[in-house]
Amino acid sequence: DQPLNGRHNLTTGKIYRTVIEKERRGDYLGNTVQIIPHVTGEIKRVIREVSESEGAEVTLVEVGGTVGDIESMPFLEALRELSYELGEHRMAFVHTTLVPVVGPVGESKTKPTQHSVRELRAIGIRPNLIFARSPVPLAPEIKTKISLFCDVPPPAVISVPDQRVVYDVPLVLEAQGVGGIRRPVARP
């Protein structure tokens, strides 16, 4: 258990405020302030600072929103850069995605997941794990399809069916061995 506070909540507003303050102090030596490298650099600095000050063995960073939305792009780029700087062996990307079930026969649709993974890959991020949210547990053939079309190993596709109580979700993940994963699942 780790108690969290305001330092653990990184928002766009906090990042932009800090970048503007640095620009006004002259920290950027009169250079034009840009998203890359100034905003992404500040995001990385804060992630590293909080992680190091806590002595964390693992740092979990959640980027909310939808892949492709302009609001999340600086955060995704910062994480891509951080992965490059740390090395792929020290960072894993977990993509949480919705697999809707539609129609009278309850068909699971994987296209939204395929498209969001394609968007991530287009910006240089390859998910190591895919948490596939769905109203029902994913059938083995759906997990295989996601694995194939999203280029992740089959054990890296984790079914996360809706739960009546949100606190049951960690138990669902544990039952699929997520707690035992200590490094990114090896690619074939």
Image (cartoon, rainbow, N blue to C red):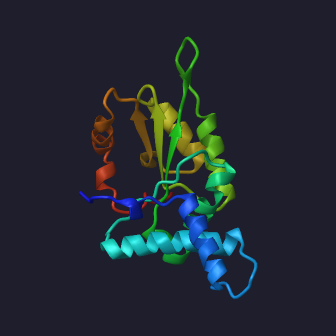
Residue at the extreme left = 1
- Rendered image quadrant of residue 111: top right
Above or below for 128 versus 47: above
- The residue lying toward the viewer, choosing from 61 and 32, is 32
Asked if residue 81 shows in the view, the reply is no
In the rendered image, the vertical position of residue 88 relative to residue 6, given as above or below: below
Residues 160 and 41: in front is 41
The residue at the far top in this view is 104
x, y percent for residue 4:
32, 58
Residue 78 location, x and y as percent?
58, 67
Q: Is residue 98 above or below residue 83?
A: above
Give the residue drawn at x 64%, y 72%. 20
> Who's the residue at 52% across and 18% down the image?
106
Q: Which residue lies furthest to the bottom in this view?
A: 29
Q: Assign the N terminus to one quadrant of the image.
A: bottom left
Q: Which residue is drawn at 48% across and 50% down?
A: 153
Report x, y in % for residue 58.
Answer: 35, 65
Q: For this rendering, which residue is in front, 63 or 128?
A: 63
Horizontal side of 7 relative to 151 (left or right) equals left
The quadrant where residue 135 appears: top left
